[in-house]
């Protein structure tokens, strides 16, 4: 039976800026708002420093500054690398802001307490280079840069007395007229509603990689922000562009798809012992962009040169003894725990769903166009275009987080206190009750399994009109099926949470497929086998999706080529 707690008064909290999501982007947004004198609350589905993707990020932060840059590098070259890597689908305004503000925010992280690896002189940053960058320009700490960032941000927010409301899934953004008035969520522990009165909301919920069968994303990245944005009236952009990271484990089954290694420390070989990237990008090899490396792997497998498990081999045996253990201690420990000796044997890997370039459409203030609705991090689209070059994700976190926090604070300061309608919270409780009342249907895990399989098989590295059409039909059919939550108690009901998440996963998947069907060309991470060439003449355009009268609708706009244009365009 439902808990008696549902009859209690609704828990209500007030703030100027509500940040939805407790990963790196959310914490940086909260910091940007708090240091600008806004009253901030961070609400997250999980625990701070234990949820989201940032805590797992092993990479580095792209940033070019005179104090540490390599000779010949510049912020303008960083800008060009990002736009070229994104195949001119980027919002060039956002890219410019990224390149200008990232260096200062790296230093801000240090002031918060973050540590970055130094050269032997103990002063200069040790810098990484990876796919798509022409110069080493990325500060890092071993293979735990994201974890270090979170630790520093959390400490800074505690000093600023910013409260963390953990284990609450936000299910709806509330509005008065056309502007944001707050949000309502459901406790993942008790299913009680929580109502937030807020002048502005910053969505920082990360991506949705778990819509794919093989993904290195944590299980809580279920596309919640995309669902919230669409319901609030915002548009999503570039959803067809999903990045598949080339190096995911193939075995054991429990590890399949999990992040398996760093491309700048390895070489890739097919089953015939050929370093095959020499054929696909002889200049950059494994440091090519991730979309090209992933396609090369899948092409080798398709043409019969793959490993027994359907992938290729990652080789690190050429590195000096102790190098992998020193530079990537967490990964090295994982290899050892799996019974693998990375210094003596090659590891079987294959691409895995990694990052969404698309997301909520935002402007240079990281505003959605809905008054009071902002975003930060991977939930937003536009920064990376058709393909994210490596190390720009952590840079995007700190830049979009800081800017959205500043702008949400500024927006909120001009408004009187906001009071949302408590009836909205009761509506969300009623939806939860209705889910628990369903007696016949499919459990959310069954729907997820079918969805993830069809997305992997039909909307993966290679796509066609037929595969995408098949996927869309499957998604719409799954969306129409009743979901049964077998556990009827409201306490610690994980299946109820999964049911709420599954709705967002289906909506996210539909958005991906509809945009992929509209783009009848190949560009960046979107490869259509039936349209294998890039077509600047017909498709130098961004595709957007929004809620229409009869479901999701796709529209398009010219791409931003205000600063940098394709050759010959």
Image (tube, rainbow, N blue to C red):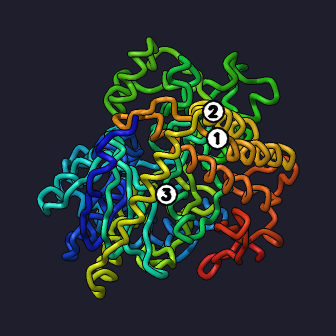
Q: Which residue in the structure is indicated by mark 3?
A: 225
- Measure the C-alpha gap from mark 1 to mark 3: 23 Å
Q: Residue at x 35, y 66 (%)?
A: 422
Asked if residue 140 can be seen in this view, the reply is: no
Q: Which residue in the structure is indicated by mark 1?
A: 482
Q: Are marks 2 and 1 in contact (CB under 8 Å)?
A: yes
Q: Residue at x 22, y 76 (%)?
A: 36
Of the residues under marks 3 and 2, which one precedes in the sequence? Answer: 3
Of the residues under marks 1 and 3, which one precedes in the sequence? Answer: 3
Q: Quadrant of residue 404?
A: bottom left
Of the residues under marks 2 and 1, which one precedes in the sequence? Answer: 2
- Tell me the SS state at disc 2: loop
- Which of pointers 1 and 3 indicates the residue nearer the eye? 1
Location of residue 470 in the rendering, given as x and y in whole percent from the top left corner: 82, 43
Q: Would residue 430 appear left or right of 569 to someone viewing this image?
A: left
Location of residue 446 in the rendering, given as x and y in whole percent from the top left corner: 62, 30
- Measure the C-alpha gap from mark 2 to mark 1: 7 Å
Q: Which residue in the structure is indicated by mark 2?
A: 440
């Amino acid at each position: 039976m439902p808990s008696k707690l549902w009859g209690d008064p609704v828990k209500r909290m007030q703030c100027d800026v509500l940040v939805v999501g407790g990963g790196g982007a959310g914490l940086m947004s909260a910091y940007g708002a708090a240091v600008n004198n806004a009253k901030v609350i961070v609400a997250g589905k999980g625990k701070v420093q234990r949820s989201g993707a940032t805590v797992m990020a092993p990479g580095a932060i792209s940033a070019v500054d005179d104090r540490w840059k390599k000779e010949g590098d510049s912020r303008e070259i960083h800008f060009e690398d990002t736009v070229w890597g994104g195949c001119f689908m980027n919002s060039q305004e956002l890219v410019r802001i990224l390149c200008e503000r990232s260096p200062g925010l790296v230093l801000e992280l240090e002031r918060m307490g973050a540590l970055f690896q130094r050269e032997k002189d103990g002063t200069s940053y040790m810098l990484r280079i990876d796919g798509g960058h022409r110069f080493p320009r990325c500060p890092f700490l071993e293979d735990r840069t994201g974890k270090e960032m979170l630790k520093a941000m959390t400490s800074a927010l505690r000093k600023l007395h910013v409260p963390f409301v953990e284990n609450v899934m936000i299910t709806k953004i509330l509005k008065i007229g056309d502007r944001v008035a707050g949000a309502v969520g459901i406790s993942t522990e008790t299913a009680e509603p929580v109502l937030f009165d807020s002048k502005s909301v910053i969505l920082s919920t990360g991506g949705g990689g778990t819509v794919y069968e093989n993904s290195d994303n944590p299980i809580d990245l279920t596309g919640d922000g995309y669902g919230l944005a669409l319901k609030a009236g915002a548009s999503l952009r570039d959803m067809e562009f999903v990045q598949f990271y080339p190096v995911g484990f193939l075995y054991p089954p429990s590890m399949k798809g999990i992040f398996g290694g760093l491309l700048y420390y390895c070489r890739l070989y097919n089953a015939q012992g050929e370093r095959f990237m020499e054929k696909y990008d002889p200049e950059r090899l494994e440091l090519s962009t991730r979309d090209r490396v992933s396609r090369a792997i899948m092409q080798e497998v398709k043409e019969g040169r793959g490993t027994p498990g359907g992938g290729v081999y990652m080789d690190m045996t050429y590195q000096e003894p102790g190098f992998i253990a020193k530079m990537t201690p967490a990964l090295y420990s994982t290899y050892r725990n799996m019974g693998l000796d990375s210094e003596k044997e090659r590891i079987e890997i294959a691409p895995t769903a990694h990052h969404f370039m698309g997301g909520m459409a935002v402007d240079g203030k990281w505003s959605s166009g809905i008054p009071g609705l902002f975003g930060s991090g991977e939930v937003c689209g536009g920064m990376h275009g058709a393909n994210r070059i490596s190390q720009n994700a952590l840079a995007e976190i700190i830049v979009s987080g800081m800017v959205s926090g500043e702008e949400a604070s500024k927006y909120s300061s001009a408004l009187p206190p906001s009071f949302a309608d408590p009836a909205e919270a009761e509506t969300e409780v009623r939806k939860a009750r209705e889910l628990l009342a369903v007696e016949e249907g499919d459990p959310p895990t069954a729907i997820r399994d079918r969805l993830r399989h069809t997305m992997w098989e039909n909307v993966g590295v290679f796509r066609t009109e037929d595969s995408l059409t098949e996927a869309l039909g499957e998604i719409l059919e799954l969306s129409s099926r009743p979901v049964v939550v077998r556990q009827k108690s409201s306490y610690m009901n994980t299946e109820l949470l999964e049911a709420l998440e599954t709705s967002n996963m289906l909506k996210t998947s539909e958005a991906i497929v509809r945009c992929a069907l509209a783009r009848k060309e190949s560009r960046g991470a979107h490869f259509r086998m039936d349209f294998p060439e890039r077509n600047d003449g017909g498709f130098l355009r961004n595709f957007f999706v929004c809620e229409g009268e009869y479901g999701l609708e796709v529209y398009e706009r010219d791409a931003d080529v205000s600063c940098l244009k394709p050759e010959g365009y």
